[in-house]
Amino acid sequence: MRGTTVTPVTLVIGSTGKTGRRIVHRLAERGHPVRGGSRHLDPPFDWERPDTWRQALRGAESVYISYFPDLAAPGAPAAIEKLTACAVDEGVRRLVLLSGRGEANAQRCERIVGESGLSHTLIRTSWFSQNFSEGHLRDSVLDGVIALPAGEVAEPFVDVDDIADVAVAALTDDRHSGRLYELTGPRALTFHEAAAEIAKAADRPVEYVAVSPEVFHAAVAQSAGLDYADLLTDLCKEVFDGRNASVAHGVREALGREPRDFTDFCRTAAASGTWR
Ligand SMILES: NC(=O)c1ccc[n+]([C@@H]2O[C@H](COP(=O)([O-])OP(=O)(O)OC[C@H]3O[C@@H](n4cnc5c(N)ncnc54)[C@H](OP(=O)(O)O)[C@@H]3O)[C@@H](O)[C@H]2O)c1
């Protein structure tokens, strides 16, 4: 009798988000069985409902973890600890964690995954370029004013397509096990420079205005609620002090190629129509 080979499934938590969506697409293209992790799928995955986690994890060999709303949130380490324990229980073999550069809470979460006893890869990234085209700053671009408490600090924005490429490599190849990859773009830009590049590619006026944390907090609270305003303001205060201004080489280390440049991101985003 011939045995059947079952290719194990990969659970992508945050499968409808900026990184997860791309990872699901890449895995499916390669013929890897993939299960989305979202509140709107069956079975659902909801960070607010730990009773949904076990069923989503069941039978998964590898898991991509993108936490919502952000690993900088106060509840993140406890949630990551609980999810990791659940993954161990369910026989998961490999974890890939999306993490943020220069964030104390995110680094706590990295340690939890690193000490899980499971094969793991940590992907620690700078600010996403796609925050301007798919994330919370898209509306600001359309309004023509990007107001952030970031002063004149420079940020080596990373392209989410690079994150997805590294994540897929880590989810499918044991050579990335035990590695911490710090991913950034190839150069740091101030938000003034980023706004100018976006304006040129989008062919519309876009400027950056440095605001105080208090002004920023009030604006976000009005549009997105107090909790999100607290989280985002604290996060900006933590990371926009210059600690993340240098470039890192995780894309080259993981993939053997250079990261995508912000100018290429702007060109691709403009062509997609997101800024029209
Ligand atoms: N943006 C940055 O610059 C940056 C930089 C470094 C690190 N990060 C990290 O990136 C992560 C976010 O990843 P992303 O940008 O790919 O995601 P995203 O685009 O922000 O998408 C959010 C995802 O979270 C899901 N979600 C929302 N509420 C949920 C809940 N209660 N339970 C389960 N899922 C929920 C959404 O799925 P459904 O709505 O379908 O449930 C969606 O798939 C954060 O952990 C953050 O720390 C971000």
Image: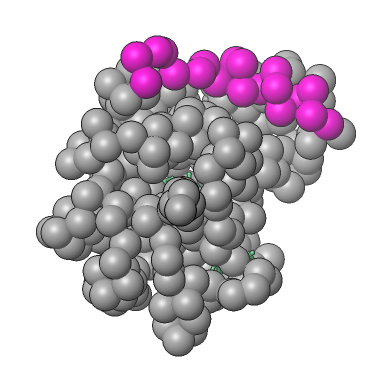
Residue 196 or residue 38, whichever sits in front: 38
Total numbered labels:
0
Vertical arrangement, residue 196 with respect to residue 217, above or below: above
- Residue at image point 17% right, 54% down: 114
Asked whether, in this view, residue 77 is left or right of residue 199, the answer is left
Magenta stretch, residue numbers: 255-273
Residue 80 placement (x, y as % from top left): 31, 68
Residue 118 placement (x, y as % from top left): 20, 56
Vertical arrangement, residue 140 with respect to residue 226, above or below: above
Residue 5 or residue 193, whichever sits in front: 5
Is residue 59 visible in this depiction of the protein? yes
Vertical arrangement, residue 41 with respect to residue 7, above or below: below
The quadrant of the image that shows the C terminus is: top right
Residue 169 or residue 108, whichever sits in front: 169
Which secondary structure is most common in the magenta stretch? helix
Residue 254 placement (x, y as % from top left): 32, 25
Residue 234 placement (x, y as % from top left): 38, 60
Asked whether, in this view, residue 28 is left or right of residue 93, the answer is right
- Residue at image point 55% right, 63% down: 37
Asked whether residue 260 is drawn in magenta, I would say yes
